[in-house]
Image (cartoon, helix red, strand yellow):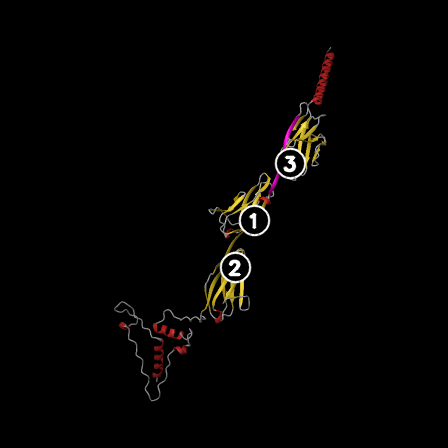
Amino acid sequence: MEKRATASRSGRYLKIGIFQLVTLMCQAVTEEPRFAEPIPNVTVALGRDASLPCVVDHLGTYKVARIHIDRQMILTIHRHVIARVPRFIVTHDNQKPWLLHVSSVEQEDRGYYMCQVNTNPMISQVGYLQVVVPPNIVDADSTPSSVAVRENQNLTLTCRANGFPQPKLSWRREDSQPISVDRRKKVSTFEGESLNLTRISRTEMGAYLCIASNGVPPSVSKRIIVDVEFSPMIWVPNQLVGAPSGTDVTLDCHTEAYPRAISYWVYQSVMLLPTQKYTTETSENSYRAHMKLTVRGLQSSDFGNYRCISKNSLGETEGSIRLYEIPMPSSPPKPTKVISGASKEERVSVIREGGAGGQSPPPSSRAPSASLPPPGQGQAPAPRPPKPPVNGTPGAASSTGCRRIVKWTQPFLVATGIFMFLATP
């Protein structure tokens, strides 16, 4: 009895297990398709390739279709491309994802794409394809690459660009100088399509850059050359120039003009051309020019009024320089030698000796000459001895509280020595 009960229970368990297995198989066969994950939004630059996935579980015998909603166009059904656009391709490798490939994306490809399964009722999901476009400046709607305006007039520079997203426009000067806005403030960069230059001056002449950017590389720019026209002006640093005969001299004039001016020198109503006598040089920087005239070997006929002349299509102006003669500078006087701490007689002696060229003569020339007396005549009188010091002691204190120092000058010492030599028997 016990064995029969055990066999009966084992049979029941086997039947239950088989039933559960059959149930699971039936559920797997009859389960409806569903999307495993949403379609991602894809962003791609113009001209690049893009792929839109669609992942479906338990597709079975059902079909997958792809539709471009914005253009109301059926692109693919299952593995077949319906749209007559060779840039669309569908792939499926017996795995879950169904991939819609779009090659060389164009702007009209932007929009919503639907992945649809033909169940009853139909199931679908949508993803967005964003096509970004780098900025592009429209030359037809912008200021030409070169523009000219008279000084103190108003000028408006315009720059327009397209792209997606809409580009932002900024202005700056190529030489990094500030931009004057409404003559009130100066900025390094100006934002906007139009740049207004009020009462433009010559200092605002140059190249302006319009830069368009929208976050999609590359950014683009347009270069606009602004020429400010005005009549010539001349500035003369030195209107009076002096030089001695026989030397060379250079005269200077600074000019400003646009359009470019013709500049030359005139002396005595004659245009000066480059010769061995005259050398002309002109260095230009934008609307500025520096004129130089060098006159060599000045003679009396070269002194007078020289004119620097500048002219363009808007006017003419000139500057005048008077060249006059000055004497040739002489050699500078030689310094006098003074010895600090010397006595008055010694300082006078040194000054007299220094007048002959600033050099001290040999010792024999500084000492006074002494000669022997002629025969028959007496000996030379003895020099007057110095006064004895106070209290008989040299350097003793006087009644005034000062010390008296006895000092013999060099000529007196020499004369005393000669006298003592002659007095010796």
**Helix or strand or loop: what does disc 1 sit on?**
strand
Q: Which residue is mark 2?
A: 311
Task: Say which residue appears at 64% left-offset and 28% top-offset.
Answer: 125
Tell me where residue 113 sits by quadrant.
top right
**Helix or strand or loop: what does disc 3 sit on?**
helix
Q: Nearer the viewer, residue 136 or 328?
A: 136
Which of the two discs, 2 and 3, labels the residue nearer the N terminus?
Answer: 3
Q: How many marks?
A: 3
Q: Which mark is residue 63?
A: none
Q: Which mark is residue 108?
A: 3
Type of amino acid under label 1: Ile
Question: Disc 2 or disc 1, which is closer to the eye?
Answer: 2
Give the CA separation, mark 3 to mark 1.
Answer: 33 Å
Q: Position of residue 49 (x, y in %)?
A: 67, 38
Q: Position of residue 205 (x, y in %)?
A: 52, 51
Q: Which residue is mark 1?
A: 224
Q: Is residue 311 above or below residue 71?
A: below
**Extreme-left residue of the structure:** 399
Q: Nearer the viewer, residue 413 or 269?
A: 269
Q: Is residue 9 above or below residue 198?
A: above
Type of amino acid under label 3: Glu
**Extreme-bottom residue of the structure:** 376
Q: Is residue 22 above or below residue 391?
A: above
Q: Position of residue 408 (x, y in %)?
A: 33, 75
